[in-house]
Image (tube, rainbow, N blue to C red):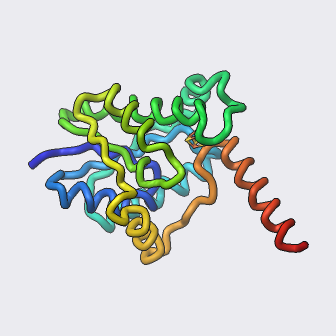
Amino acid sequence: MKKVLLHICCGVCAGSVVQRLRDDGFEVTGYFYNPNIYPQEEYKQRLEVVRQASQLLGFTLVEGLYEPSAWQKCIQGLEAEPEGGKRCLACFRVRLQKTAEKTKELGIEHMASTLSVSPHKNVQEINKIGSEICAGFLPYDFKKQDGFKKTMDFAKEHNFYRQHYCGCEKSRIEAELRDANKSRIGTK
Ligand code: SF4
């Protein structure tokens, strides 16, 4: 059977992606490597949801290290970039690079990432970076075939914790500002 190491950004996103890869004949091992997540309590919470997803879906989960200072180094100078800009490209690269290293270490032929299930992320950039890093990268667009809807349904069904920001400190601040603006408009 073909094997794939799946980089998982959060348990919510794992639902439909694991199933899609299985439908396509892959044996899936999950890999949680997301040093971008801030703060550590949030990291632990998201990891816990991935553990739940691995139990519910029955896949092996490999847990990477939480190394936020290594991540900070890789995005140095890009801190002020808006969400979707160069900081995010560097962030994708760090996580996919580590996944490629783990793929090789485990002797697995293919790698993929749940990142493309999000409608907020640039799938072309994710797939370009993944293909540059690893010859066995599978350039899926997991939001297609109702992938995003299915993954949300899975999260709702199992009452998963769902984060309201992408992951890093800057994205948290931006989300809080958006929420504050929304409630200000709502009270007018
Ligand atoms: S917004 Fe998301 S993808 Fe972009 S740098 Fe922050 S955590 Fe990474």
Residue 98 in view (yes/no) = no
Question: Residue 39 or 83: which is nearer the viewer?
Answer: 83
Quarter-wise, where is residue 38 in the image? top right
**Relative to 72, residue 187 above or below:** below
Query: Dividing the image into 4 quarters, which one contains the C terminus?
Result: bottom right
| Residue found 9% across the figure and 49% down from its top | 1
Residue 102 percent location from the top left of the image: 31, 33
Query: Is residue 159 shown left or right of residue 100?
Result: right
Tell me the quarter of the picture where residue 105 sits.
Answer: top left
* Farthest bottom residue in view: 157
From the viewer's perspective, is 137 left or right of 151?
left
Residue 95: % across, % down: 44, 35
Does residue 97 appear left or right of residue 25 in this picture?
Answer: right
Q: Is residue 151 left or right of residue 178?
A: left
Which residue of the protein is positioned furthest toward the right in this rendering? 188
Which residue is at 45% across, 30% downward?
A: 93
Vertical placement of residue 70 versus 113, above or below: above
Q: Residue 120: x and y, percent? A: 54, 51
